[in-house]
């Protein structure tokens, strides 16, 4: 049976992938994480992406027995880990083993997502009753612990010994985003209720106001305050993005050029993520001061967006060529024969 896809969900996934490339242009090409409005986009980009990842992962009616657990984890290992290890080795070459810390030379996202799949799958298998409460509570605790560990690392690292190397390899600091993954899965589980809530004008207004408030608040060293800002802005941001794409779903159908383009990007997110590091024009770092000295936000946005779309185009062309080979499609992008 063919999978039924919701077009605005695929379009939203494509949009968030564009934001990822946009952010990496800011970081790797101009060395400024907060330029070109990225300071605000950063608050909603990854929460929205992991929300969609959780939404797509959750299957209504799936029975979580030991066989399902093994199948899911082995499949996700082939799709997430094997291609990422190959691309990390190709990109880093002689520095491969030095890039196995928390952020994996930039490739932490797919490693982290695999961990989320494992955490969610094992929780579903082990917990038989009140799963929703356990999912949400455990995701919150994991997210808080990971955030606290990140901000406290330099103070406690010497006490952990070799444990910090293990936590680094597992990318524990990135587990803070597991909260949004679980929220995406729960939104899928209670989809009708989620739609009913997000359709309410009062909730929409509150979400926008809260997001703007969190974006305007200063960043402080008080970790609990910083975590509150991170969590609230992330939840509000992902709800805003979802509501926008659903409200204007007719813009994002395959009959519209914008919708068709975003959906195609949305079905190639793994390919783009794995490939885009090879195409980022890092030589532009020498022009950073020239661009930022103008203090013109819209010029920054235009330059970064054009570069991001250019990198995106190169990724899609390369992906298309590589996918012509079943062998390369399988081991570089985790594409099975039934998906072709």
Image: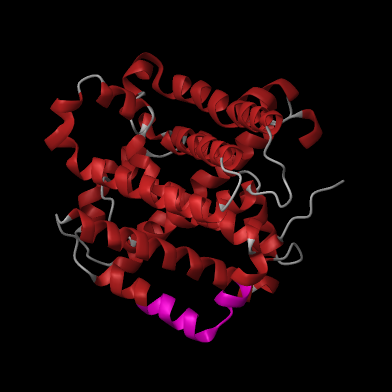
The foreground one among 299 and 253 is 253
To which quarter of the image does residue 235 belong?
Answer: bottom left
Q: Is residue 297 visible?
A: yes
Q: Residue at x 66, y 63 (%)?
A: 8
Task: Pinpoint residue 269: horizontal percent, then vertical percent.
Answer: 58, 44
Task: Pinpoint residue 59: horizontal percent, then vertical percent.
Answer: 69, 49
**Residue 203 counted in the magenta span:** yes
Q: Residue at x 55, y 83 (%)?
A: 200
The foreground one among 143 and 255 is 143
Q: Residue at x 60, y 54 (%)?
A: 55
Q: On screen, 210 above or below 138?
A: below
To which quarter of the image does residue 322 belong?
Answer: top right
Q: On screen, 280 above or below 177?
A: above
- How many numbered marks have been drawn onto this rendered protein structure? 0
Task: Pinpoint residue 297: horizontal percent, then vertical percent.
Answer: 30, 67
To which quarter of the image does residue 161 belong?
Answer: top left
Q: On screen, 173 above or below 324?
A: below
- Residue farthest toward the top in the current orientation of the protein: 94
Q: Is residue 307 visible?
A: no
Please state the extent of the stretch shown in magenta in the rendering: 195-209
Q: Is residue 175 left or right of residue 255?
A: left
Task: Pinpoint residue 265: horizontal percent, then vertical percent.
Answer: 62, 50
Q: Residue at x 44, y 47 (%)?
A: 178
- Residue farthest toward the bottom in the current orientation of the protein: 202
Q: Is residue 245 left or right of residue 279?
A: right
Q: On screen, 116 above or below 61?
A: above
The foreground one among 249 and 159 is 159
What predominant SS class does the magenta segment belong to? helix
**Residue 180 counted in the magenta span:** no
The foreground one among 326 and 6 is 6
């Amino acid at each position: 049976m063919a999978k039924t896809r919701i077009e605005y969900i695929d379009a939203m996934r494509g949009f968030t992938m564009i934001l990822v490339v946009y952010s990496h242009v800011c970081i790797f090409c101009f060395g400024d994480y907060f330029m070109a409005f990225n300071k605000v986009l950063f608050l909603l980009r990854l929460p929205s992406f992991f929300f969609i990842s959780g939404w797509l992962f959750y299957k209504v009616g799936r029975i979580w027995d030991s066989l399902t657990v093994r199948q899911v984890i082995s499949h996700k290992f082939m799709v997430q880990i094997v291609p990422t290890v190959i691309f990390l080795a190709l990109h880093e070459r002689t520095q491969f083993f030095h890039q196995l810390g928390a952020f994996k030379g930039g490739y932490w996202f797919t490693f982290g997502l695999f961990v989320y799949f494992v955490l969610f799958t094992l929780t579903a298998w082990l917990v038989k009753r009140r799963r929703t409460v356990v999912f949400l509570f455990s995701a919150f605790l994991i997210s808080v612990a990971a955030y606290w560990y990140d901000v406290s690392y330099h103070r406690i690292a010497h006490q952990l010994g070799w444990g910090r190397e293990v936590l680094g390899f597992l990318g524990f600091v990135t587990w803070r985003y597991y909260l949004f993954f679980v929220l995406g899965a729960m939104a899928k589980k209670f989809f009708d209720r989620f739609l009913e809530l997000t359709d309410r004008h009062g909730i929409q207004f509150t979400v926008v106001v809260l997001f703007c408030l969190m974006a305007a608040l200063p960043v402080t060293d008080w970790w609990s305050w910083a975590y509150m800002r991170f969590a609230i802005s992330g939840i509000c941001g992902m709800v805003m993005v979802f509501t926008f794409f659903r409200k204007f779903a007719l813009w994002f159908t395959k009959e519209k050029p914008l919708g068709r383009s975003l959906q195609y990007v949305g079905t190639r997110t793994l390919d783009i993520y794995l490939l885009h590091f090879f195409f980022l024009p890092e030589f532009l770092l020498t022009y950073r001061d020239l661009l930022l000295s103008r203090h013109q936000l819209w010029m920054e946005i235009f330059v970064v967006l054009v570069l991001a779309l250019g990198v995106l185009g190169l990724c899609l062309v390369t992906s298309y060529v590589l996918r012509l080979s079943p062998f390369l499609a399988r081991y570089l992008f985790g594409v099975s024969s039934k998906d072709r």
